[in-house]
Amino acid sequence: MPPATREPHAIGLDIGGTKIAAGVVTASGVVLDRTRMPTPPDDQAATLAAMVGVVDELRARHPGVGAVGVGAAGLVEWPRGRLRWAPHNAYRGLELRRLLHERTGLPTVVDNDANAAAWAEARFGAGAGSDDLVLVAVGTGIGGGLVLDGAIYRGAGFGGEVGHMIVAADGDPCPCGSRGCLEAMASGSALGRAGRAAAAADPDGRLATLAGGAERVTGEAVFQAAAGGDEAAVALFQQAGFWLGVGIASLITIFDPDVVVVGGGLAATGELLLAPARASMERYVFGRRYRELPPVARARLGADAGLVGAGVLALRSRR
């Protein structure tokens, strides 16, 4: 464990569809300690209990923490911190900020997870020094965060949900209930779904063999096959990257950021995803011949971005 610090520090939590990641974070974005656990499926009470458990665990090792910050997937009311709904999580109308404050006695902030990650990347990561940044978080689903003019942009409350802008009106169904969302076309879940279809069409191919059957193909299996040179798997990444680039082109056209940061678990696949995304972005962005395009960069903070941003936002709220 890193040595103790006199710098103010908070507990930051990143609540995703499959895992809860938490850490003790300083005001300068340094992670002093961390822990993680699976997100309990289909049980709001168990999810809340898990959050309280990781806070208690870290607080026992760092009794000097001064606040709790949470970045949670889905529709989060700001600044109330009420979790209205998320496609991949069990909570519905959960008064998380109030409940965590009551359980811990600490000042508590709850924001959207991609907002928190965008703030961390803008201050300490791939967009350090930028006042205008777009984050696209590509994981189980796709989230988004906007830092505009040096502040998180939330609109009337729920701004930044870039994963649910429509990029293909006749595209695949999305867990949100719509069709052709960026999430439905380019997320890890979309990649796994396309991989299962490809493996079913070629049951003796590398992808089906690697996964142990077409029905067991996941996005991770597609990545392993693509990294090994399997042409079918590489083509699936090109397809996902194409749609990701279409979405990024629209975001650049609307917001004209200094940098577009791609984070989330699928960003770890690197150029397999980013190269086709940049190519389609350049094809579809408005006014390509007459403008300089921002870099499309892989997130620098990796899996820590959400918890770092949540912790730093909690510390800022105490000022």
Image (tube, rainbow, N blue to C red):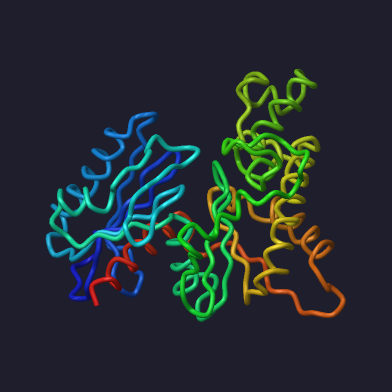
Image position, residue 308 (x, y; %): 37, 63
**Rendered residue at 41%/52% (across/down):** 76
- Say whether residue 6 is left or right of residue 151: left
Q: Is residue 279 left or right of residue 252?
A: right
The residue nearer to you, when weighing 192 against 174, is 174
Residue 54, percent from left and from top: 24, 46
Identify which residue, 168 or 38, lies in the foreground.
168
19 and 41: which is toward the camera: 41
Looking at the figure, which quarter contains the N terminus?
bottom left
Labels in figure, total: 0
Quadrant showing the C terminus: bottom left
Describe residue 304's horizontal placement relative to residue 25 as left or right.
right
Query: Where is 51 relative to 253, above or below?
Result: above
Placement of 52 over or under 305, stated as above or below: above
Instruction: Using the image as rendered, state which of residue 232 and residue 137 is in the foreground.
Output: 137
Residue at the image point whose x is 72% and y is 45% from the top: 240
The residue sitting at 59% across, 58% down in the picture is 136
Q: Is residue 39 left or right of residue 9?
A: right
Image coordinates for residue 224, horizontal then vertical, percent: 64, 38
Q: Which residue shows up at 28% across the image and 70% down it?
A: 26
Name above or below for residue 207 compared with residue 263: above
Q: Which quadrant of the view contains residue 317? A: bottom left
User: x, y percentage for residue 227?
Assistant: 69, 43
Note whether 261 is above or below 73 in the view shown.
below
